[in-house]
Amino acid sequence: MNRALNKVFVWPISTRIIHWMLALSFTTAFITSRFEEMLHNHVALGFIFGIMIVYRIIWGFIGPKYARFSTFKLHPSKLKFYFVEKIQDRWRAIPAGHNPASSWFTIWAMIMGSIIVTSGMLLYGIQEAKGILSFLNNSYYNHMDILMIIHQIASYIFLFWVFLHISGVLIEQFYHKTNMVFAMITGFKRAKGEDTEVSKRLNFFAYSIIIISIGTYLFITSSNYNFLTSQKFTSIDYKSQNPIFVEQCGDCHKIYPPFLLPKASWGKVMKDLDNHFGEKITEANITKSQQSTIKDFLYANSAETSTRESAVKIMKSLDKRRPKAITKTPYWRETHKDIPRSAFKTKKIKDKSNCIACHKNFDEGVLDDMNIIYTIK
Ligand code: HEC
Ligand code: HEC
């Protein structure tokens, strides 16, 4: 290897790729989490991040010299000495591999990263009812809120550490002038030590993992219906389940899936048909026996009976209230608060109750984030 004086080759290309893929996938996953319609990108980036975390942990046991956990400097006294020396001696020599601060940072990042990925996969399965863990939705739907809190807090802690890490590197770069920024780009560090070497087998392993992670990304973003993305809840054919409901209640507006309101709300809707949002619906329109068929159907499929995210969250947001409209539930208000009121008055949408204008296949009970056809500007 062509090597200049006092330069040591510490980060082989495989290690550098892990590092930058971790950094990039975390940053982009963080950004895409802000946008509901980018759920698949978010999840796919999370998969890259997760695969890289697992790979980094394995790399810590079998990887090249300076990447191994056995070379980490984890004793608290070393960490203390690191900072004392840093303050006292601007021109101190730096170690070839991980210094005590970056050793600790790597360990904590692996732990936090694992928490982020695990809670994210559980959320995708339990809350969104999507992917390979969607079977958990049925038993654990009540835990979606706490999972979300864990997922978010862990991500913010991770982000905070990333800032600490970047600050540390910049201090090395500009104050101590150890050229640390470029070490993770070129692989060379200005330190004393042996060059690292990576066997062909290790390189093969590293490149395979990288290809798998990118392949997974492409697979997830390619379709809403493969085994990593499809939702447990498929479209419901209400017409075959209860033709009277669809014919009578789908006359003036598209039907509202029964799982979006609790029993008592449907009870009120059916009791007050003669004053139905400004319309007068009488037995001449919907006969008594049709009304009771519809009511039974609404009751049997109300929000209480569903483990869908929307049903669970509507129930939670309602507490003891039982409004007659979905648009009157706190959950609906909360999820639509960023949509300007003028959007509901456009020619195409007309009214906030016109759910299907923004939620494709709404009348088949589909409320998948991937089916939202309105983008908040
Ligand atoms: C005569 C026309 C008509 C029929 C028939 C009708 N509705 Fe409605 N419904 C309306 C109107 C008008 C609104 C107000 C919202 C709108 O403009 O779409 C409304 C609103 C609703 C809402 C509130 C939606 C929201 O904003 O959250 C529910 C729930 C509802 N209807 C259920 C039913 C059910 C159940 C049936 C069958 C028993 C039914 N409707 C039949 C006209 C009708
Ligand atoms: C103007 C378009 C528009 C209309 C009309 C509309 N929605 Fe939405 N809805 C959205 C958007 C956009 C989001 C995603 C909000 C976000 O990104 O936080 C959303 C989110 C939701 C969610 C939460 C989905 C999730 O997984 O987070 C539910 C449930 C929902 N809408 C139900 C309804 C119902 C029921 C109606 C009709 C009563 C309705 N929406 C009418 C645009 C609309």
Image (cartoon, grey):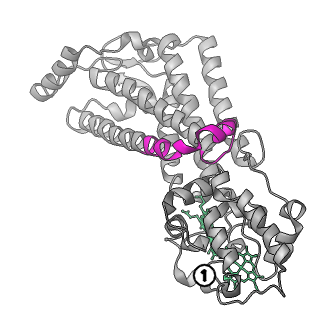
Which stretch appears magenta? Answer: 127-152
Q: In the rendering, at what x and y percent does residue 252 appear?
A: 78, 83
Q: Amino acid at mark 1?
A: Phe
Q: Please tell me how crowded label 1 is: few (under 14), some (14-19), or many (20+) other residues with Cα within 10 Å.
A: some
Place residue 169 in its image quadrant.
Answer: top left
Q: Inspect this view and state whether residue 361 appears.
A: no
Q: Relative to 331, is 362 on the left or the right? A: right
Dot 1 corresponds to which residue?
A: 344
Q: Relative to 99, is 209 on the left or the right? A: right
Question: Does the closest atom of ligand 2 sit within 8 Å of the Cβ of label 1?
Answer: yes
Element carrying mark 1: helix
Q: In the rendering, at what x and y percent does residue 20 appear?
A: 49, 35
Q: In the rendering, at what x and y percent does residue 271 appear?
A: 68, 77
Would you place residue 19 above or below residue 236 in this image?
above
- Magenta segment includes 15: no
Would you place residue 243 above or below residue 172 in this image?
below
Q: Relative to 212, is 112 on the left or the right? A: left
Q: Main secondary structure of the magenta part?
A: helix
The image quadrant where one finds ligand 1 is bottom right
Q: Residue at x 86, y 64 (%)?
A: 242
- Magenta segment includes 142: yes
Q: Residue at x 66, y 81 (%)?
A: 272
Q: Inspect this view and state whether residue 340 appears.
A: yes
Would you place residue 31 above or below residue 107 in this image?
below
Q: Residue at x 62, y 49 (%)?
A: 41
Q: Outermost residue, front direction?
A: 288
